């Protein structure tokens, strides 16, 4: 979560298998897993939502708000990156913030969505990084602006990249849709029952889905 994210884009200079491990599976997920264990097992979801902080905020609401701000800001930064692995790195910052947002929502829908997003993101992001690594090894191409027509030379790689990108954007029938759908339901139920602020969190989720399409589509279209 911002502003503790800066190590992640800088770590993308590592070889693709290593950066895939960093960005998709082991290192970044350990943080999200740690937060989830604290929320679920140390305090419990009910206490996290009821725990009062200064200025009348609850701990759960602060957790979700930080996640919402981070996922929106990271998606906007990703739009500006021409280097493919840098764009994927900021996408990772954004997607991990979904997990934090879901953990702060009151009710089991948000929690289930957050926990589902841990393996869903791992599979999708690892696919994207391996595709980026294959492009680098086979064509020495790292920048999106230099990828014109590369899909005709590497149709399987770009096909896999496209499917994983659609999953990251939350397109139905793919894993990313299921987790984000549960978080949307959790935010709407929380807004209807407890606090209207949750509707802003739902708006951030929807906006991030649009931004996901906005920063993945140029890669697919160019290739």
Image (cartoon, rainbow, N blue to C red):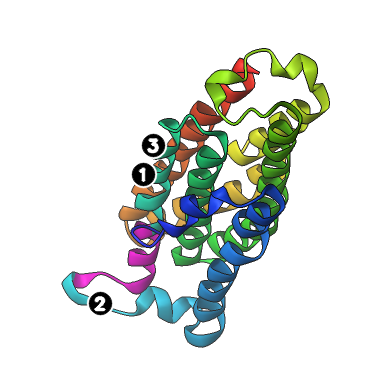
- Marks 1/3 in contact by CB < 8 Å: the verdict is yes
- Identify residue for label 2: 53
For marks 1 and 3, give the CA distance: 5 Å
Is any part of residue 186 visible from this angle?
no
Q: Quadrant of residue 117?
A: bottom right
Over which residues does the magenta segment extend?
A: 56-66
**Residue 190 on the magenta segment:** no
Q: Residue at x 53, y 69 (%)?
A: 31
Q: Nearer the viewer, residue 2 or 82?
A: 82
Q: Residues within 10 Å of mark 3 (few under 14, many from 20)?
A: some
Is any part of residue 15 visible from this angle?
yes
- Identify residue for label 1: 73
Residue furthest right as drawn: 156
Q: Position of residue 129 (x, y in %)?
A: 67, 43
On screen, residue 107 above or below 212: below
- Marks 1/2 in contact by CB < 8 Å: the verdict is no
For marks 3 and 2, give the CA distance: 29 Å
Q: Residue at x 65, y 45 (%)?
A: 176
Q: Count the marks: how many?
A: 3
Q: Name the secondary structure under disc 3.
A: helix
């Amino acid at each position: 979560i911002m502003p503790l994210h800066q190590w992640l884009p800088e770590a993308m200079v590592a070889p693709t298998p290593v950066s895939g491990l960093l960005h998709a599976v082991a290192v970044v997920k350990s943080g999200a897993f740690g937060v989830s264990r604290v929320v679920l097992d140390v305090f419990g979801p009910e206490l996290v939502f009821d725990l009062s902080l200064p200025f009348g905020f609850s701990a759960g609401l602060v957790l979700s708000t930080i996640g919402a701000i981070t996922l929106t800001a990271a998606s906007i930064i990703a739009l500006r990156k021409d280097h493919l692995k840098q764009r994927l790195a900021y996408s990772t910052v954004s997607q991990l913030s979904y997990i934090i947002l879901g953990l702060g929502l009151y009710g089991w829908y948000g929690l289930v969505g957050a926990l589902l997003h841990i393996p869903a993101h791992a599979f999708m992001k690892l696919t994207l990084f391996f595709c980026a690594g294959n492009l680098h090894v086979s064509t020495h191409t790292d920048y999106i602006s230099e990828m014109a027509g590369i899909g005709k030379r590497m149709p399987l790689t770009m096909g896999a990249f496209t499917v994983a990108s659609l999953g990251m954007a939350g397109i139905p029938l793919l894993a990313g849709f299921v987790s984000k759908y549960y978080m949307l339901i959790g935010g709407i139920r929380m807004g209807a029952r407890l606090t209207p602020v949750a509707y802003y969190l739902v708006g951030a989720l929807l906006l991030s889905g649009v931004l996901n399409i906005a920063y993945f589509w140029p890669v697919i279209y160019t290739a």
